[in-house]
Image (cartoon, coloured by chain):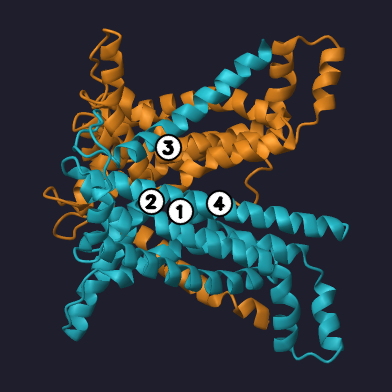
Amino acid sequence: MLKKMSSVPYIVWMLLFVIVPLGIVVYFAFTTQDGGFTFDNIVQISKYTPVFVKSINLAVIATIVCFILAYPLSYLLSRASANYQRTMLMLVMIPMWMNFLLRTYGWMTLLENEGLINKVLEFFHLGPFQMINTPGAVVLGMVYNYLPFMILPLYSIMAKIDQSVIEAAQDLGCNSIMVIIKVLFPLSLPGIITGITMVFVPSVSTFIISRMLGGGQNMMIGDLIEQQFVGSAYNPYMGSALSLILMVIMLVVMGIMSSFDDDEMEGIVI
Amino acid sequence: MKKAVSRIYVGLILLFLYAPIFVLIVFSFNESKSRSHFTNFTVKWYRELFQNELIMTSLWNTVKVAVLTSIIATVLGAFAAIGMNAMKKRGRSLMMNLTYMPVINPEIVTGIAMMLLFVFICTLVQWVFGIRLELGMWSVLIAHVTFCVPYVVLNVLPKLRQMDNNLYEAAMDLGCTPLQAFLKVVIPEIMPGITAGFLMSFTFSLDDFIITYFTNGSTFQTLPVTIYSMTRKKVNPQINALSALLFVVVLLLLVLMNVKQARDGKKNGRDGR
């Protein structure tokens, strides 16, 4: 009995600081400035449809690029020697430990019109290209920041795949493409799902990367929400409605993702 | 042939990961403010960095919050895990849902939700006590504990499941009071989980920008918030100097940790583990 009681402070804390705040968000989403009930905030969101489409679009592209980059790398890693694996994992993780604002700032200086990449291109009589403040730069920033989130789950699932399973498939007449489709892909599915979720969720809700690398023109859902709470366009009612929609999108995505795979997220009932 | 292709491929990915960091570091030693043209070697940006009071204050704030957060989150989370481990399946799965919520929620939503709560608390305090309360360190601290504590729970819980429950009872049979049995048997058994949770909380708190950005009010700044406002303004090589220093610190810490791990591994290897 005493043991069970020891989680009471945690329950109280989480109710107060997780459930209550989300309740406030839901309340604000359906409230007018004077405190009356309304669906207006939700209805109004339709005028921001292009922003939503753009965010989801960019996040999907970033997730696909991450996957294409990370999948072969994770496979190579999982088949390499233990020492090589350890070193490479370290190398993948070190940038993650640096604040993402600084890393994104690094890309800002590289992509600028007067930046290093354009200087190098100029040397070869190419360019200059407009790279910063484009949707491409935003995707690049997302890929850069979240690539390790794709590599790590993929690697850890692939490290568990027995080499003899792959060899057996080859002995039974699979060529390399068939090995990938019939063996590697199904066995690594849980890692793929975790990776996709871990890249897509922060990508679609980011507001810093799009602002730093996308300039003012590439607004995403995150920027839109931030503007409702910080700065001149203060409107927490609209901001809450937007957040609510964002959460719904996330839940749908995660629902779809976990339907591919039944035993991964044990304990999540929602 | 195949090997060469895979080498080049791995090399390109590493180049992609490290290019911006190295460019930042190289240009931290550049005398002119240009970010593409290297003129002369200098360390003046480092000197300016250490004289920058705003950066030093926010660094101190960041450390304060991170230390307090990791302590509070670890205590709260470890006890929660012990309680959850004793619960029936239904209660535990309910608690797991509660635990996963801040983990899966987009950070920006967590941030604005907490901001709304804190603003509400401030209004309430003003209305009831007539005291003017503003967002500041207290709100950042609460927010950080809230998003860190699930990671402590998720780290400690598996250790508790692995633990043999008979050990606790054996200790009591041998004359321990429940408190002694808890301190001498349970705590050492779950210590690796507690340490991992503590370290995760510490680094997450140190590094957090989004949630802090919404809950810090107008006077309390942590380092990531200061960095953000610096990147919004024009070119400032102090940012480069700061990046270089942080990179070196991270590198040193990781190398130290790895050396320690390798040493422990060897020791355990000899014990036959």
**Coordinates of residue B181 in the picture (x, y in percent):** 75, 84
The amino acid sitting under disc 3 is: Asn
Q: Is residue A7 above or below residue A111?
A: below
Q: Quadrant of residue B272?
A: bottom right
Mark 3 vs 1: CB contact within 8 A? no
User: For this view, does A188 lie left or right of residue B163?
Assistant: left
Q: Are marks 2 and 1 in contact (CB under 8 Å)?
A: yes
Report, in whole angstroms, how far the alpha carbon at label 4 lies from the one at label 2: 14 Å
User: What's the distance in space between the residues labelled 1 and 4, CA to CA?
Assistant: 9 Å
**Residue under numbered circle 4:** B254
Q: Position of residue A265 (x, y in %)?
A: 62, 46
Tell me the residue at 80%/72% (across/down).
B165
Q: Is residue B69 left or right of residue A130?
A: right
- Tag 1 and tag 4, C-beta contact below 8 Å: no
Q: Are marks 4 and 2 on the same chain?
A: yes
Q: Quadrant of residue B18?
A: top left
> Do tag 3 and tag 2 residues touch (Cβ < 8 Å)?
no
Q: Chain of mark 3?
A: A
Q: Secondary structure at mark 3?
A: helix
Looking at marks 1 and 4 on the same chain, the residue that comes earlier in the sequence is marked by 1
Q: Which chain is cyan?
A: B
Total label count?
4
